[in-house]
């Protein structure tokens, strides 16, 4: 049952990711991104990381996507207009993409370590207590650096928004 649910969520995630890139309207792309985030949360649940799955839904599927949709609506972004300027990209795009994927697959296949099979639900490191313990001991400096960077980004957004108003 776990393998079937994994395959279903992986396919949904890949289809939503392709839909995200191929959509011409930004709201449709944002909704596809919500589909990706929710299917990834189910994959986290299958691996036994309940806290990370709920954080994925609440933070990314909720707060960040509301922010994305708010910005899209604030900018009044319409559908993407297609431009037929690059004939080289139209002719050579797919063959170059397939060559790049083949090259990456060859390189990854050559350096991959010996893997053991995944046992769904066997990982116990995804609980809130374990994550909090690691976050405030081993990863305290990166956590604080990221919080300062987010504060700087918020201040920069406020400064840019104030210049737009004046």
Image (cartoon, rainbow, N blue to C red):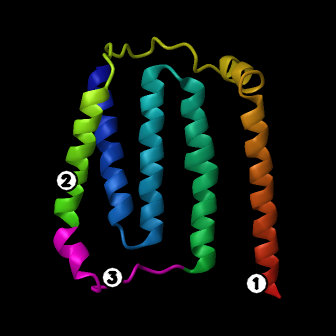
Q: Nearer the viewer, residue 54 or 106?
A: 106
Q: Mark 3 highlights which residue?
A: 82
- Relative placement, left or right, of 101 versus 133 is left
Q: Is label 2 in contact with label 1 (beta carbons under 8 Å)?
A: no
Residue 83 belongs to the span the image colors magenta: yes
Measured as percent of width and height from the top left, residue 84 is found at 27, 85
Q: Nearer the viewer, residue 89 or 47?
A: 89
Measured as percent of width and height from the top left, residue 91 is found at 16, 73
Q: Is residue 71 above or below residue 53?
A: below
- Residue located at (42% from left, 79% from top): 79
Q: Which residues are magenta?
A: 77-92
| Distance from the alpha carbon under mark 1 to that under mark 3 | 28 Å
Residue 90 belongs to the span the image colors magenta: yes
Circle nearer the viewer, 2 or 3: 2
Task: State which tag comes first along the sequence, 2 or 3.
Answer: 3
| Residue 165 lies in quadrant | bottom right
Numbered tag placed on residue 164 in the rendering: 1
Where disc 2 sits, the SS reads: helix
Q: Mark 2 highlights which residue?
A: 99
10 Å neighbourhood of mark 1: few (<14), some, or many (≥20)? Answer: few
**Magenta stretch, main secondary structure class:** loop
Q: Is residue 154 above or below residue 13?
A: below
């Amino acid at each position: 049952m776990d393998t079937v649910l994994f395959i279903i969520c992986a396919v949904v995630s890949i289809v939503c990711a392709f839909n995200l890139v191929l959509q011409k309207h930004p709201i449709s792309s944002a909704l596809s991104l919500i589909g990706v985030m929710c299917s990834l949360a189910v994959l986290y649940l299958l691996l036994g990381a309940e806290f990370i799955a709920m954080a994925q839904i609440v933070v990314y599927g909720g707060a960040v996507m509301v922010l994305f949709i708010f910005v899209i609506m604030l900018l009044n972004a319409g559908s993407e207009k297609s431009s037929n300027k690059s004939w080289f990209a139209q002719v050579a795009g797919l063959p170059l993409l397939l060559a790049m994927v083949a090259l990456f697959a060859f390189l990854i296949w050559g350096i991959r370590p010996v893997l053991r099979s995944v046992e769904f639900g066997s990982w116990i490191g995804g609980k809130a207590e374990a994550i909090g313990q690691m976050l405030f001991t081993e990863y305290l400096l990166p956590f604080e650096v990221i919080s300062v960077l987010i504060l700087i980004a918020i201040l920069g957004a406020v400064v840019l928004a104030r210049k737009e108003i004046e």
